[in-house]
Amino acid sequence: MAEVEKIRIEEAPETLAMDPKKFILWGFIVTIIMLFASQTSAYLVRRAEGNWVEFEVPQIFWYSTVVLFISSVAMHWAYLAAKKDNFSTLKIAISITFVLGMAFLVMQFFGWQELVAQNVYFVGNPSGSFFYVFTLLHGIHLITGLLVLCVTFVSSMRLKVHAKNLRRIEICTTYWHFLDILWIYLFVFLLYFR
């Protein structure tokens, strides 16, 4: 009888396991993708209906895109530092990422002010309304990314992020890169389909 159970145990198929926190992250990312897919679809449908007033996208949005891209490079630098147990570089890189993320949000706000100066308001112009909604939604998700950065920074200060425990930094890096790619997609979309 014991031999039969031993054979059954040996023949049991391997189960695929995924870290629960990484699974939650990917579920959240898929949800965000669906949100923005629905919004970009609504944008295209509304644009096709007419009464669409085009406007010049303020230059600061270009600059903020570069800032966010550089922050993604800094985030990758933090990840590489964690893999090598280079704790001082890890803290510096996460700090740079955080500062650049905050700078991106401030630049977005100044971009809104420039839109208002062009008489592009949240209400009254569907193309302007969508621009505000897209930038606001992305900004809210970027704030969540900044919170994840803070948690990762505190963990790195407590030496809980290191070569043998990369889960926090991997989650943070994945989410931050996703937010960068999402913004580039949105920005190109808004430029192309103005």
Image (cartoon, rainbow, N blue to C red):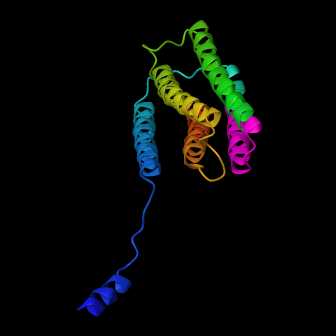
Task: Judge left or right: residue 153 versus residue 16.
Answer: right
Query: In this view of the protein, which residue sits in the foreground, 16 or 41?
Result: 16
Residue 192 point in image, percent of width and height: 60, 36
Please check the rendered image and state whether residue 83 is part of the magenta-colored stretch, yes or no: yes
Which residue corresponds to the image point at 46% horizontal and 15% vertical from the top-left?
122
Query: In front: 22, or 4?
Result: 4
Specify the principal SS of the magenta part.
helix
Q: Is residue 29 above or below residue 131?
A: below
In this rendering, is residue 123 above or below 134? Answer: above
Q: Is residue 72 magenta?
A: yes
Q: Position of residue 91 (x, y in %)?
A: 70, 33
Total marks shown come to 0
Task: Indicate the quadrant where residue 89 lies.
Answer: top right
Q: From the viewer's perspective, is 155 left or right of 66?
A: left
Residue 56 visible to the viewer: no
Residue at the (57%, 29%) spot, across then down: 150
Q: Position of residue 181 (x, y in %)?
A: 60, 42
- Region in magenta: 67-89
